[in-house]
Image (cartoon, rainbow, N blue to C red):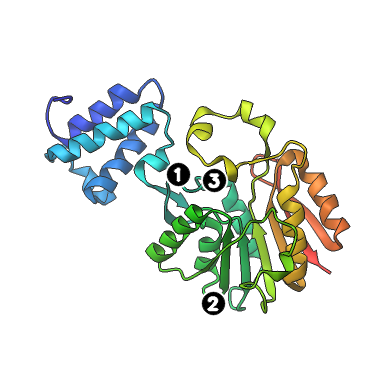
Amino acid sequence: MFVQTNSVKAIRAYFKEKLSNQFSESEIKLIGNEVICSRLNFSAADLISANEKLLSESDLLFFRSVVKRLLENEPFQYVVGNAHFYGLILKSDKRALIPRPETEELIDWIKESYSKEKPLNIADVCTGSGCIALSLKSIFREANVVATDFSKEALSLANENSIDLSLDIDMIEFDATIEAHYEKISLLDGQKYDCWVSNPPYIPNEESLLMSENVLKFEPHAALFVPDVDPLLFYRVISKMANFYLKKSGLLFFEIHENFANDVVQLLESLNFINVELKEDLQGKSRMVKAEKL
């Protein structure tokens, strides 16, 4: 056996021994707690007296597989199978990007811009796991929320999260890079939206050389990268679509690449959006933009 006993305490020691070269002691403790709670259906209170609890052979093999996957640099959220985002626990796997904490700041900005009491029509383009759409639905309970993505796999994950969280949103499959016929997306027809939001792919391919191995090896590249020659591809097409579907004075929100912040502003102004506003994230980087339809 790879541990001295089949106890939770022994598994904690195993995590510490095997993962100490890759993670800090506090990170290992957090990883261990979350994996143990997830596997054994423990609450935080259960952990206090869990050290002597005996584990089955299948449990032991599961914990060993977790360590193996972490040592291979697989993101922790994929290993444990979920990610925490804006107070929600979302299923997380290779079908979509892991929700990032910075995107929560975009949710805050949208939340500040509308009354909770007013029924809203909201579209989230390039939804991935559904983190933005579901967070907004959890805030604006009376809103009609539509989530779109070109990836059937991402939409299936977003749908599973919608069901698990009992947050009802609509799903539409379409490719946000195709500019032709964007006015004829039948499932959007007849709607006039208060809010469009998108965190689209925005990293130029050349920047992949600077990214960490666990992102490049495990997360879907189509949700990350854009051609070096056209880094505003998604912003251009989505902005034109939003201009068509938004109500007068409706708002468009984007998460953006800090290096292209001014370019996105200029693009929006060229499409006759008004009151275009950049917003910095907590690290002082221009990472969000809001614009109003004329």
Q: Residue at x 73, y 71 (%)?
A: 246
Front residue of 273/176: it is 176
Let me know if residue 129 appears in the view. no
Identify the amino acid type marked 3: Arg
Which-is-in-front pick, marks 2 and 1? 1
- Residue 187 to residue 125: above or below: below
Of the numbered discs 2 and 1, the one sitting upstream in the chain is 1
- Label count reads 3
Q: Give the side of residue 255 with respect to residue 214, left or right.
A: right
- Residue 254 to residue 168: above or below: above
**Mark number displayed over residue 54:** none
* Mark 2 neighbour density, 10 Å: few (under 14) some (14–19) many (20 or more): some
**Mark number displayed over residue 100:** 3
Return the x and y of residue 236 as percentages of the image width and height.
Answer: 77, 53
Which quadrant of the figure contains the C terminus? bottom right
* Mark 3 neighbour density, 10 Å: few (under 14) some (14–19) many (20 or more): few
Return the x and y of residue 109 as percentages of the image width and height.
Answer: 65, 58
Which residue does the numbered mark 1 point to in the structure image? 94
- Residue 106 to residue 218: above or below: below
Which residue does the numbered mark 2 point to in the structure image? 142
Q: CA distance from mark 2 to mark 3?
A: 26 Å
Which quadrant would residue 160 be assigned to in this image? bottom left
Most extreme residue toward the front, as rendered? 180
Return the x and y of residue 1 as percentages of the image width and height.
Answer: 13, 25
Q: Give the side of residue 141 with respect to residue 166, left or right.
A: right
Q: In the structure shown, which secondary structural element does the residue marked by tag 1 occupy?
A: loop
Return the x and y of residue 134 as percentages of the image width and height.
Answer: 51, 62
Q: In the structure shown, which secondary structural element does the residue marked by tag 3 occupy?
A: loop
Q: Residue at x 11, y 39 (%)?
A: 54
